[in-house]
Amino acid sequence: MREQSLHTPVEEARSGRGSERVAHSLAEISIELMDDLPSGSREDTGPSLVADTPERTSVPEVYDWTALSYAEVRESLTELVGKGYLLHGSNPGSEQLHRTLTPYQGHDVRRESGQRYGVYATDNSVAVIPYALMNRKALRQRGFDSFVTSFGVSQVSDKPAAPYIGVDSKAVFDYIVEHPEEIFTAGYIYVLDAEPFVPAADAPDELVAEGEQIPRMIVRIGAQVGRDLFRPDGDNPTLRLMEPARAN
């Protein structure tokens, strides 16, 4: 697997999976991206954390963002959405990585749009983050097999938007609070072309496409972002105990 880091000079490393190469320094990547921007827009962009989006191939590039903070991840994803791409978050609970996204049956009990068969994506660079960081597989392995998670975005006064996670089970909520290192693990965000996706009528930032989708690129974000971000305390908690969901 080839991973590219945004903060590490070029170097070569070897692993059991073959050669891994990390990309140029942040400054060099910023120049590459700015060269790709329309004339007249460069002065407004500031330093960029996003490399040029690669051309579509059958083996998409994987970028290592595990050293980035939440603010840096959010900024980078916002840049990609601004370039017209959609995002899909996934936490496989392991080092597993999917080079192709296959359709699946949605099971959202709160919204009809989440019950379609297809590949889901969003143009919301904040809402996608909990999908990549919450290891729901770990909860099921602990015997929690009857709970509903709800991911959303909260905006308070002039503070930046932040994602939140809600669960409808007190036992699950307590377990997450006590074991954040087990529940929030590194995950992947897949960057997709928008063309095949159709918006949902009842959730405009949720889109679905039929058939397999090959990402344009993939980024891996670090577990510490989730452990720092999703907390049950404060005036606007980002980890919440919700009312039990009811099926439509």
Image (cartoon, rainbow, N blue to C red):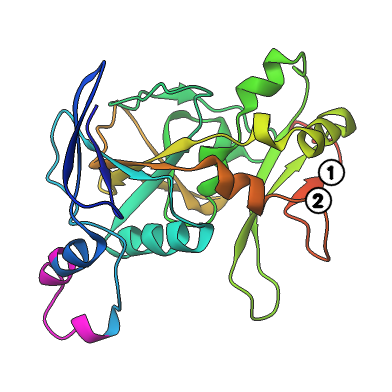
Dividing the picture into quarters, in which one does residue 246 lie? top right
> Left or right: where does residue 187 sit relative to residue 19?
right
Residue 204 drawn above or below residue 140: below
| Residues in magenta, as a range | 32-43
- Viewer-nearest residue: 216 or 48: 48
Q: Do the residues labelled 2 and 1 touch (CB within 8 Å)?
A: yes
Residue hosting label 2:
232
Residue 214 percent coordinates (x, y):
24, 32
Count of numbered marks: 2
Residue 35 covered by magenta stretch: yes
- Viewer-nearest residue: 234 or 204: 234
Mark yes or no: residue 124 visible.
no
Residue 226 drawn above or below residue 141: below
**Alpha carbon distance from label 2 to label 1:** 9 Å
Report crowding for label 2: few under 14, some 14 to 19, many 20 or more residues within 10 A (C-alpha): some
> Left or right: where does residue 220 sit relative to residue 28?
right
